[in-house]
């Protein structure tokens, strides 16, 4: 692989070494050969400012998904199993979805509750957004009116 980035040339040599070559204003080159592990180590130490925001968004969406599955399951009509031939399959699928989403969100819910109880806002979970969106982790606080 060979790539050019501004005045930096990046090339992968036959032995797998990564060669960085940069020209200075006089036209002379500075060359550094790195083992791929060295390049990965350097790249791993660089901060990515979007990571906390992306994690918070993912956690918020996962909690919302879990709560929506739970709301749908709670809002199923009690006589659905008598009225609908496919109710057992649908109910089983929905319960399995609730179980999977609950498992994926188990530690997210714990951290959201801890930050609310401590009065601290953890960067990864914005509790005010969850509560304002009706995504409380408490079943008694969920709203089912818009489901059916």
Image: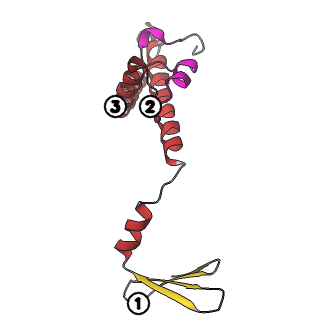
Closer to the camera in the image, 13 or 100 = 13
| Residue drawn 43% across the image and 8% down it | 140
Which numbered circle lies on residue 107?
A: 3
| Precedes in sequence: disc 3 or disc 2 | 3
Contact flag, marks 3 and 2 (Cβ < 8 Å): no
Nearest to viewer (mark 1 / mark 2): 2
Q: Which residue is mark 2?
A: 122
Nearest to viewer (mark 3 / mark 2): 2
- Residues in magenta? 122-144
Tell me the distance, in whole angstroms, between the alpha carbons under discs 3 and 2: 13 Å
| Residue drawn 36% across the image and 23% down it | 114
Image spot of residue 22 (x, y percent)? 57, 84
Q: Looking at the figure, which quarter contains the C terminus?
A: top right
| Precedes in sequence: disc 1 or disc 2 | 1
Residue 22's place in the image compared with 63, above or below, is: below
| Residue drawn 41% across the image and 60% down it | 45
| Precedes in sequence: disc 1 or disc 3 | 1
């Amino acid at each position: 692989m060979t790539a050019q980035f501004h005045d930096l040339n990046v090339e992968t040599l036959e032995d797998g070494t990564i060669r960085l070559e940069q020209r200075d204003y006089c036209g002379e080159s500075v060359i550094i050969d790195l083992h791929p592990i060295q390049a990965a180590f350097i790249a791993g130490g660089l901060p990515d400012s979007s990571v906390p925001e992306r994690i918070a968004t993912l956690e918020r969406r996962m909690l919302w998904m879990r709560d929506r599955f739970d709301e749908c399951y709670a809002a199923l009509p009690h006589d659905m199993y008598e009225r609908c031939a496919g109710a057992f399959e649908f109910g089983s699928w929905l319960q399995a979805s609730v179980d999977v989403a609950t498992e994926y969100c188990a530690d997210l819910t714990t951290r959201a509750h801890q930050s609310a109880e401590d009065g601290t806002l953890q960067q990864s979970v914005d509790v005010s957004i969850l509560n304002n969106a009706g995504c409380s982790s408490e079943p008694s606080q969920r709203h089912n009116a818009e489901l059916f």
